[in-house]
Image (cartoon, rainbow, N blue to C red):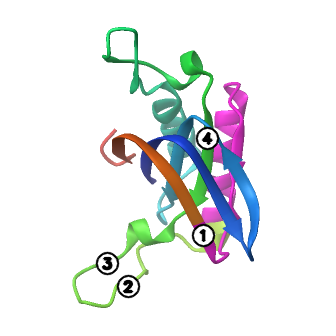
């Protein structure tokens, strides 16, 4: 699994002109699932993302995690994280098919909720408009193949 995680002061997702998910301070998570991923990767990635200490403490140091600051997550499915970019036109054969990706996308969110976090989300496969106010900016790339 791959995730691009951005620290935000606010973020939302619109589908067909309607806001479907919205958060204040927290993480915007663009989540991609590969064909070999399992629940093990979803659990491990949720643990890493939810425990990541990138919020500033009273001394301006990145030392606080999502729980400490009372943050939330907005999780957006992002199969393009597995794009094959060898040519000018991306190919997406490296991304998991929906029968694998949807349950793991949902499992990731379930894991975050089980840790006590409020989780908003988009709609798998929908044409979404995502907006965020990046804080810092702080943006991190997680790849379970490297964790």
Q: What stretch is highlighted in magenta?
A: 101-129
Decide whether residue 28 is among the magenta residues: no
- Mark 3 or 1 closer to N-term? 3
Q: Name the residue under label 1.
A: 129
Q: Mark 4 points at which residue?
A: 73
Decide whether residue 121 is among the magenta residues: yes
Tell me, for residue 91, which label it has, or none: 2
User: Residue 101: image x %, image y %?
Assistant: 60, 64
Tell me, for residue 142, which label it has, or none: none
Q: Do the residues labelled 3 and 2 touch (CB within 8 Å)?
A: yes
The residue drawn where x is 37% and y is 85% is: 91
Q: In this view, does 90 lie above or below 19?
A: below
Q: In this view, does 66 lie above or below 19?
A: above
17 or 97, which is in the foreground? Answer: 17
Q: Report, in whole angstroms, how far the alpha carbon at label 3 lies from the one at label 4.
A: 28 Å
Crowding at mark 1 (Cα within 10 Å: few <14, some 14-19, many 20+) = some
Crowding at mark 4 (Cα within 10 Å: few <14, some 14-19, many 20+) = many
1 or 54, which is in the foreground? Answer: 54
| Tag 3 secondary structure | loop
- Mark 3 or 4 closer to N-term? 4
Can residue 95 be seen?
A: no
Q: Report, in whole angstroms, how far the alpha carbon at label 1 lies from the one at label 4.
A: 16 Å
User: Residue 127: image x %, image y %?
Assistant: 63, 78
Q: Mark 3 points at which residue?
A: 84
Crowding at mark 2 (Cα within 10 Å: few <14, some 14-19, many 20+) = some
Can residue 102 be seen?
A: yes
- Mark 1 or 4 closer to N-term? 4
Q: Is residue 16 above or below residue 39?
A: below
The residue drawn where x is 32% and y is 90% is: 89
């Amino acid at each position: 699994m791959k995730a691009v995680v951005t620290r935000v002061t606010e973020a939302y997702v619109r589908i067909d002109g309607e806001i479907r998910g919205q958060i204040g301070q927290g993480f915007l998570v663009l989540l991609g699932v590969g064909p070999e991923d399992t629940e093990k990767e979803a659990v491990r990635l949720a643990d890493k993302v939810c425990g990541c200490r990138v919020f500033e403490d009273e001394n301006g140091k990145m030392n606080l995690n999502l729980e400490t600051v009372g943050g939330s997550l907005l999780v957006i499915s992002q199969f393009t994280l597995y794009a094959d970019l060898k040519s000018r036109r991306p190919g997406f054969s490296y991304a998991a098919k929906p029968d694998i990706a949807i349950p793991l996308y949902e499992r990731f969110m379930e894991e975050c909720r089980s840790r006590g976090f409020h989780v908003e989300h988009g709609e798998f496969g929908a044409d979404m408009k995502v907006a965020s106010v990046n804080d810092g900016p702080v943006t991190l790339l997680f790849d379970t193949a490297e964790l």
